Image (spheres, helix red, strand yellow):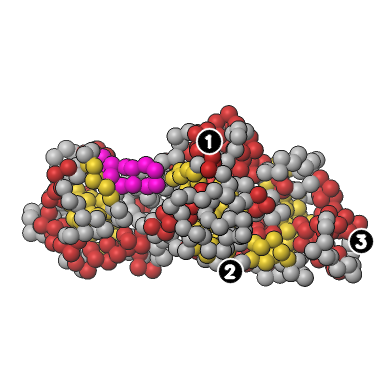
Amino acid sequence: MARIVPDNWQHLEAVGAAARERETLALLERGLPAGYTVYHGVHWTRLSEGFSVFGEVDFVIVSPAGRVMIVEQKTGFLRETPAGLVKAHLQTERNVAVTLARTVEGLHRRFTAAFGAGTYWLEELLYCPDHVVRNPAIAGVNPARIVDAARKSQLVAIVLEALPADEARLPCAAKIHHFLADELSLAPDASALVGAAGTLVTRLAGGLAAWARRLEFAPFRLRVIGTAGSGKTQLAVQVMKDAVARGQRTLYVCFNRPLADHIAKVAPEGAKVANYHQLCDWVARDGGHLPDFEGRNVFDELERRFAQAPIDARWQFDAVIVDEGQDFQQAWVTALERLLAPGAAWWWLEDPLQNLYVREPVALPGWTVLRESTNYRSPRDILAFLREAAGPAAPAIAELAAGSPFDGSEVALSTWDERAGAGAAESSAEPAAGVSAGLSFESPVAAATKRAITQALALGFRKQDIVVLSFRGREHSQLTALDHLGPHRLRSFTGQYDLFGNPQYREGDVLLDSVYRFKGQSAPCVILTEVDFEAFDERAARKLFVGATRATMKLIVVASQRAAGMLGETARA
């Protein structure tokens, strides 16, 4: 049985294409005899410079003699063209042979620098278990080194033929293993199994939570201005844990109800978690007022009652954390200040780039300010896409640093034709289940979004890993009225609340929400749809930024043709 490095791969949950890579790892472990080592998820640049979880080489197999084979695995459908074998992603294609050649060339350079020219043997192999290569002569890869669907049962045998166990041991054999092990030791959580990505990103983004909590001054008033993915949520949770452990009364307040519901699941027992209007509701009910959530201006009335309600010790806290502070109004600061117990610590977390309501920043005179501009959550190529797309419309995006070790996630851009009209039916579209009476057929944007969901599923993402976000917002989205997109059931907010102010959701498998409501949260695969604008101004750039930075692994943008044209050729697929 072969040795697998890293060796914890059986216990990690794989999503995306990594589920297929895990199958290959199991096959190689069982099929290759002792003495062979399989390195998976090997990345050739250091953590501080970033590396690719999605691209580069998938496996490195080392024989007992020290001969090396790199294996590039391409799952799904491929297309044979006169220029060679290509992998299609929505609207663009990538030449498999060119990608593999670049990988081989890069590894040759690294090995030559480490061991010297001519001291090692490097083989290559293309593994495409879902595709039969009909014309190997034009594939662009040595036919003897292509294992397609017709030959996948021979994978192990072909590897053993290329890497014989009984040949003389190369002088650099030990150095080969030291080299590969050293590369892996730089980021032990990163592997081809991208289900482990959350662990590594959480660890990296934890820096803000670690050192911000070491600050001491009185009175404690700290305004943290941090970009998306910088670790603000981790900081908020750790602050709550610290306060609860000290026996202090703790309150977390944010703007969005979905974020409050999410934080409530991870907050320590004993901490109060609410969005601002929830908090207003609690105080109003405590004073004997029962809000009518079916009435008009109910939230304005709640704000007024909270601001005027008498506050006693029962509603005062030793630690108060405000999240999404960029969405708060100045009057709310005064209302919240009354909830501070003597000597209380007050934390204010915000991100100006997520100010979608274009509100003036609240004034917090005398507060200490801490800034963090590194995004650890979003793959590096998503940040690169945003920088190029935003341009002069939002120059602040260009100043952000990419702290994620992940790259090559392949931002995908798909379009629909806005000239077809909001309710027009495509000639080839089938009737969509659950469509409201005004839409008997799928609109072009709905059909394009459905294709994007299918694309995400084809990449191996589970339905619970996919979130569809409307760029237009819930009130103006064509998708709000839908409970299905083709065969995909949508889980979405109905717009209704129960008697206690809890939002009501449709049952479904794929979450449908808006960029406004999903701020502060994230998902492995985000489909940002209904992206359309007449001019790409700062507000449009901010909305694009918010939606795109919700993705931790994969971003698919579904845009109108005019919007895609303004974004430019920045999306890689």
Q: Inspect the image, locate mark 1, and give the three-letter code of the amino acid beneath it.
A: Arg
Name the quadrant containing residue 460: bottom left
Q: Nearer the viewer, residue 208 or 451?
A: 451
Count of marks overlaid on the render: 3
In the picture, the disc for residue 507 is 2
Viewer-nearest residue: 507 or 105: 507
Q: Which residue is mark 3?
A: 310
Percent position of residue 381, x then y: 45, 42
Mark 1 lies on residue: 562
Residues at circles 2 and 3 in contact by the CB criterion of under 8 Å: no
**Disc 1 residue crowd, few under 14, some 14–19, many 20+, Cα 10 Å:** some
- In this picture, residue 283 sits left or right of residue 368: right
Q: Residue at x 13, y 40 (%)?
A: 118
Residue 294: numbered disc: none
Q: CA distance from mark 2 to mark 3?
A: 40 Å
- The answer to whether the residues at label 2 and label 1 have Cβ atoms under 8 Å apart is no
Q: Which residues are magenta?
A: 86-98
Label located before the other in sequence (2 or 1): 2
Tell me what residue is drawn at x 61 percent, y 60 percent: 436
Q: Position of residue 221 (x, y in %)?
A: 76, 48
Rounded to the nearest angstrom, the CA distance separating label 3 from label 1 is 53 Å
| SS state under label 3 | loop
Specify the quadrant that holds the C terminus.
top left
Q: Amino acid at mark 3?
A: Pro
What's the amino acid at mark 2?
Glu
Dot 1: what SS?
Answer: helix
**Does 201 appear above or below 371?**
below
